[in-house]
Amino acid sequence: MAILTKIRNRSGLAIGAVGLALALFVISDALNNNMGLFGGGQVTDVGEIDGEKISAKEFDAKYQLNIDNYLKRSGQESMDENTKTQLRDQTWNQVLNDFLMLKQYETLGLTVSEDELSDMVFGNNIHPQIRQSFTDPNSGQFDLNNVKRYLKQVTEGTDENAKAQWKEFEDYIVTETLQRKFSNILKKGVYGTSLEARSLYNARNQSAEVNLVAMPYFTIADSTIVADDNDLKSYFKKNLDKYKEKENSRKLEFVVWDFAPTTEDSAIVQKWAFDQLAQFQAADNDTAYVDLNSDVKFDPNPKRRSEFPESVQGRLFNDSIGTVIGPLFENGNWTLYKISGVKQDSVFSMKASHILIRVEGPTDLDTANAQKKANDILARVKKGEEFATLAAEFGTDGTKDRGGDLGWFTEGSMVKEFNDAVKSHNKGDVFVTKTQFGFHVIKVTGDKSKKTVCAGVLSRAVGASDKTTSIAFNEASQFAAISRNSDDFAKNVDEKKLLKRVAEFVRETDNFLPGYTEAREAVRWAFNAKVGDVSDVLTVGEDKYVILTLTAIREKGKSNFEASRERVLNDFRKDKKAEQLTEKLVKAMESGSTLDAISKGLNQPITPVPALTFENASIPYIGFDPIFAGAAAGTSELKKVKGPLKGDAAVYAYEVVKMVPAPPAANYDAQKAEISNTLTQKLEYNYFEVLKEIKNVKDNRHLFY
């Protein structure tokens, strides 16, 4: 079963780790209602790839399969919103992968044969996931016989679920191998040329000694640059390409009403818990009582001590059957436990604390010093010093902050030497044991036992009452009623002194707003609204209402003035500052031909830069300015005043005093390798996105969920 669990975990993670950013998603109930949300069936496709439509029903079928597989692997009955979000994206990317990548593999003739798969599973070239799944955690050794035994058990057995999981695992190995082959082919096609390598070498090693007079843009206050809408729109039209959006996004403003549980709400659930005490005690059928009254169903499986909260472990494993423990408040719930049955496990549960002394070097002397230190600590414990205090002082792992306490653990969960040492001692014993991690001073803090307990757990979460929820909803509804557009929204926020929040770049697939998770409903509204619209009362997470207004729409590949207004304003101001500073610099250069004269005319200092390189474009007192660095690197005339030069950070007059060429290099092999590595890394992470661009992938999922 341990191997099966590993396979489940590997296959679960594998789907999302194939390198294509695979992740998982939920179609809304509208799919089962003839698309009623979207005007009687007007929208039926979740996307399009190279002109081929992806129907919502087809997509939903794939999604449901992913949901079922996830629940089977995890053993859960439901999932949280974050997992749903992951599942949503995975389904979409699986569709893209099937369409885009399988065609690429077919065109290139890439396959994984049965012999090749066998070789990776139980042959001479074991796949890393197989090796990891079948490696003994205690010894660190991989045994191929374990793989063969497991495969025989699965193929000859009757467990169809195990067979399906193994098939899923094999499919992952095939997919990952095909992707790796494809990636390797692409990598072979990119490399750094000799010209690129020499340019990189020179950019780093050729330097210029420069003197300059700078007129920084920050010397002119933004407030002095006045611009009306006509100025900004004119500037925007002249620079449309500069403001093209790279992806679809929305800008939102929103306010939040919190309806988290109040003290009164908590008191109501607390009273419920104490009222249940006598009834739970008297119940003849614990299963029926828990299923009827608790937030969680009755679990008939006996559990080890470590599987229960520490606060109830002692009584659960020492009191008699029928005992009710609680009520206790834990993790936002009021909870009672009733001992319903006791069984014996096949292995021991043990409890201990330890102080780990690591061996700090490779020599025998290092080992001897660590052992002596452990023995010295042992002697101090035996003389009566507090173990927890010494653990905090000398421990070298994460347990030192809790006095070395390891809590309860199951036999076999620790490395063999540690496990056997604790198992062979009794409660209260203190001793030293050596493992691969170092020397452990160990104190056994509990009697080992094979006892397991089945407990009925009667639990109810402290949630917001109807009264609390209604108050928040009514306040939000009143705000929505008087906020018919963005202007109303802004005015009412000010009048009611509410905290307005801004979400600058909200994407179609986002499931959150800044500071708030589980906001899919709000994101979907944003992509179906018009600028100026105000939403109804929407829910964010489990305990918040939100009202939003859409203030800007950004569409991929298009330039939108309102969406780019801030950027346009900043660029406009920068250009206007450059014009003013350039004008001053031109006058100064007309009055004086030397840099010293220009400096005096402008009352600006001459800044020497002794070794400016093209790659390191930092200018003292000015900042990063690659435009200036490029101009200086390309200068052929020395000791001649040049300018005005409009840079990224300032307007300059300058002279290159000296060019220091890069030292001769025997070759540029290191630079070639660096360029090649950079190119292959970019290619490995970006080729899927490039394929999506080439095939004109359209994603309409935001219309459905």
Image: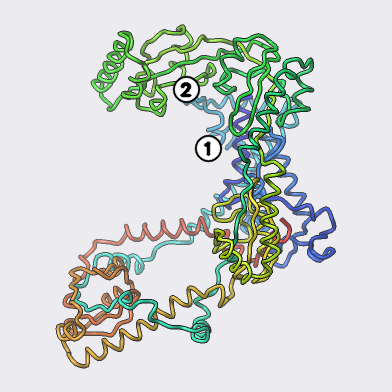
Side of 554 relative to 380 (left or right): right
* Front position in the image: 332 or 266: 266
> Quick check: 184 above or below 697?
above
Front residue of 633/313: it is: 313
User: Which residue corresponds to the image point at 25% horizontal and 91% vertical from the top-left?
Assistant: 587
Mark 1 element type: helix
Q: Quadrant of residue 596?
A: bottom left
- Looking at the image, is mark 2 or mark 1 nearer the viewer? 2
To which residue does mark 2 refer? Answer: 139
Question: Is 550 left, or right, of 41 in this rendering?
Answer: left
Placement of the N terminus among the 4 image quadrants: top right
Residue 21 in the image: x percent, y percent?
58, 52
From the image, tell me which residue sits under label 1.
128
* Residue 130 drawn above or below residue 661: above
Amino acid on which the number 2 mark rests in the picture? Ser
Nearer to the camera, 439 or 638: 439
